[in-house]
């Protein structure tokens, strides 16, 4: 139960034994000292126990240092008073007042608790002996927060050296700032003879996904200077550290390599991949973290691959509420740069989105709400599950979701709308974790009357998604071949005309020949036809009828649900709201292995696009 006097939020976990009296054992009021208080005394109470039979084991967690026993190494437990109350002095040295977590455990008085120092998490051996446990979160109320790449980041700052390094970390604008163009600058500075490093921590928890970091600086630093972009779960074992990229020689000037990807622990063979990375800024670095594998990719601004890496071992787990993404710039072993100079790195981009799992996008036909169904990564045939289904925005009246594609090449799918009344076409350029924050929503063009936006896909193989329109009167099909950036097009030819009753419903490389194909559905019969497109995207070689779904089912998109490289068909029954996936096999789009109903949308919610 949360104490009404306390502003802090804490987690309570109880080890429940099979007796009615033990089930009544619980925490009473707990009042921790405010962050930064010195001296800092925590008071509390344990209910339902024989006080003389139990003690309190207290540990504090300081960012970059770990958990420490309190109050002292020669006094690792505190006895309960006859009424079950207790009082623990938490500040006995160092920077104890800066502890962000406080762990309390009720242990039998007969248990001898060792002195714990620099522990990554609450020791399991101690938890095994505990009757009750709680971890109190006590964030710094004055911590500095900056906005970068559409997300909030906490700037690390502590008054004593902490890991990595150890280093002093500063939140001064001399060390961390975002410039007018939105780029993040991390610096290592010398202030009054003292060296300071820098680190920012994503405010939101992270999970499996695809992370992209764009570095707009040189890639070679002083041998003692290290840049890191990595996942990390504070106060958790394992800490789920995966280093998307580390730049540096780690104090060894003779090391011919200047970069590495690491899946911790690095001691497992194959988990550490050191290499020499060169390229003209900016360079783009990506990590795809799935439950069963991690892959890495570095490329230049033109998409030329500079390095690829893969770790097929068992990656660390995700899902911890304290798992964040971090960017830091620090000194190896806390040693000054060999050249004696300050250092700077510029990060011009960051994004994180769910990896590989299909995403379905829905719009409510009554209130224009927009929602996404994020499916689990690499889900198997027949096992498609919705990982999350946020309603994240509401479109203005008259605007209908028509397609989803990464229009500006930042790795995040953007949402494309059309106003059927005006013909206006608008792109929601998305950003942020899960790609659900709208950074801008310009109207890029107005289509001529009767031209309806029906899909978005790269039709000519230039790496840029193109916009596909169909004329509602003549059935003509036009492709807007888009330029980089996604807001202008180079040409808009009419490439074909569909037969009466046939409408474009989806796109996908159905025969896996490297060309995007068009899928059409007959609105009268329900039949589905594939136009197998030729190179260039303006003509097709064959247009067979490949499927005949039951009455009432509308083809709404394609996506590879079972990770076999073949686009699967997605249908929705507009009457019942049911959504079905046809798991396709072969290379002609005519055979499916199963067609389960994976979910049912709420009334008025239509699946309108897939990615």
Image (cartoon, helix red, strand yellow):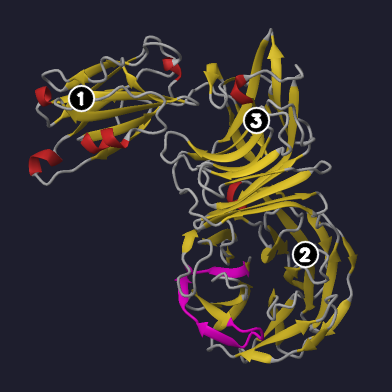
Examine the rendering and report whether any part of residue 386 can be seen: yes
Placement of 75 over or under 374, stated as above or below: above
For the residues labelled 2 and 1, the Cα–Cα distance comes to 65 Å
Identify the residue at horizontal 70%, vertical 75% (top origin). Answer: 507
Q: Position of residue 405 (x, y in %)?
A: 71, 62
In front here: 388 or 460?
Answer: 460
Residue 606 lies within the magenta run: yes
Q: Read off the magenta span.
A: 585-609
Q: Indicate the secondary structure of the residue bearing disc 3.
A: loop
Identify the residue at horizontal 75%, vertical 16% (top origin). Answer: 340
Which of marks 1 and 2 precedes in the sequence? 1
Which of marks 3 and 2 precedes in the sequence? 3
In front here: 269 or 426?
Answer: 269
Q: Position of residue 271 (x, y in %)?
A: 56, 47
Q: Label 2, on which residue?
A: 465
Looking at the figure, which quarter contains the C terminus? bottom right
Q: Label 3, on which residue?
A: 250
Q: Label 1, on which residue?
A: 112
Q: Position of residue 138 (x, y in %)?
A: 42, 26
Q: Indicate the secondary structure of the residue bearing disc 2.
A: loop
> Is mark 2 in CB contact (under 8 Å) with mark 3?
no
In front here: 592 or 604?
Answer: 592
């Amino acid at each position: 139960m949360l104490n009404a006097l306390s502003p802090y939020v804490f987690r309570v976990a109880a080890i429940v034994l099979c007796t009615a009296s033990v089930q009544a054992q619980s925490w009473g009021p707990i009042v921790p000292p405010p962050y930064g208080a010195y001296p800092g005394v925590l008071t509390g109470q344990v209910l339902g126990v024989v006080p003389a039979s139990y003690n309190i084991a207290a540990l504090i967690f300081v960012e970059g240092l770990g958990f420490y026993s309190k109050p002292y190494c020669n006094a690792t437990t505190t006895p309960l008073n006859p009424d079950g109350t207790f009082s623990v002095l938490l500040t006995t040295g160092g920077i104890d007042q800066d502890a962000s977590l406080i762990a309390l455990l009720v242990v039998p008085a007969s248990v001898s608790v060792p002195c714990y120092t620099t522990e990554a998490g609450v020791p399991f051996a101690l938890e095994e002996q505990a009757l009750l446990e709680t971890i109190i979160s006590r964030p710094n109320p004055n911590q500095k927060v900056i906005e970068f790449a559409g997300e909030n980041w906490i700037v690390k700052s502590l008054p004593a050296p902490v890991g990595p390094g150890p280093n002093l970390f500063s939140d001064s604008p001399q060390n961390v700032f975002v410039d007018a163009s939105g780029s993040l600058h991390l610096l290592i500075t010398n202030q009054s003879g003292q060296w300071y490093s820098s680190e920012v921590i994503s405010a939101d928890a992270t999970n499996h996904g695809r992370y992209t970091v764009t570095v707009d600086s040189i890639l070679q630093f002083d041998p003692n200077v290290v840049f890191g972009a990595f996942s990390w779960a504070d106060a958790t074992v394992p800490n789920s550290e995966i280093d998307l990229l580390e730049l540096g020689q780690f104090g060894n000037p003779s090391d011919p390599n200047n970069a590495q990807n690491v899946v911790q622990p690095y001691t497992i063979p194959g988990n550490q991949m050191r290499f020499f990375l060169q390229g003209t800024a900016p360079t783009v670095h990506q990590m795809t973290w799935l439950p069963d594998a991690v892959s890495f990719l570095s490329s230049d601004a033109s998409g030329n691959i500079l390095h690829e890496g893969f770790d097929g071992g068992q990656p660390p787990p995700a899902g911890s509420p304290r798992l964040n993404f971090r960017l830091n710039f620090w000194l190896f072993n806390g040693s000054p740069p060999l050249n004696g100079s300050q250092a700077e790195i510029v990060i011009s981009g960051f994004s994180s989105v769910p990896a590989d799992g299909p995403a379905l996008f829905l719009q409510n036909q009554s209130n224009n709400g927009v929602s996404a169904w994020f499916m689990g990564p690499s889900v198997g045939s027949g096992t498609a599950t919705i990982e999350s289904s946020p309603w994240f925005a509401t479109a203005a009246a008259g605007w209908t979701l028509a397609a989803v594609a990464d229009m500006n090449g930042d790795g995040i799918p953007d949402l494309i709308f059309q106003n059927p009344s005006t013909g206006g076409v608008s792109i929601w350029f998305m950003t942020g974790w899960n790609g659900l924050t709208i950074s801008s929503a310009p109207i890029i063009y107005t289509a001529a009357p009767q031209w309806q936006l029906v899909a978005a896909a790269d039709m000519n193989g230039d790496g840029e998604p193109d916009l596909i329109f169909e004329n509602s009167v003549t059935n003509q099909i036009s492709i807007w071949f888009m330029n980089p950036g996604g807001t202008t097009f180079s040409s808009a030819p009419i490439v074909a005309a569909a037969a009466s009753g046939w409408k474009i419903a989806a796109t996908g490389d159905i025969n896996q020949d490297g060309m995007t194909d068009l899928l059409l559905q007959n609105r009268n019969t329900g039949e589905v036809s594939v136009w197998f497109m030729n190179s260039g995207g303006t003509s097709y070689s064959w247009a067979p009828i490949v499927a005949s779904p039951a009455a009432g089912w509308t083809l709404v998109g394609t996506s590879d649900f079972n990770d076999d490289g073949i686009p699967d068909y997605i249908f929705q029954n507009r009457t019942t709201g049911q959504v079905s996936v046809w798991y396709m096999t072969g290379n002609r789009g005519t055979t499916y292995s199963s067609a389960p109903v994976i979910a049912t949308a709420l009334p008025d919610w239509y699946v309108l696009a897939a990615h």
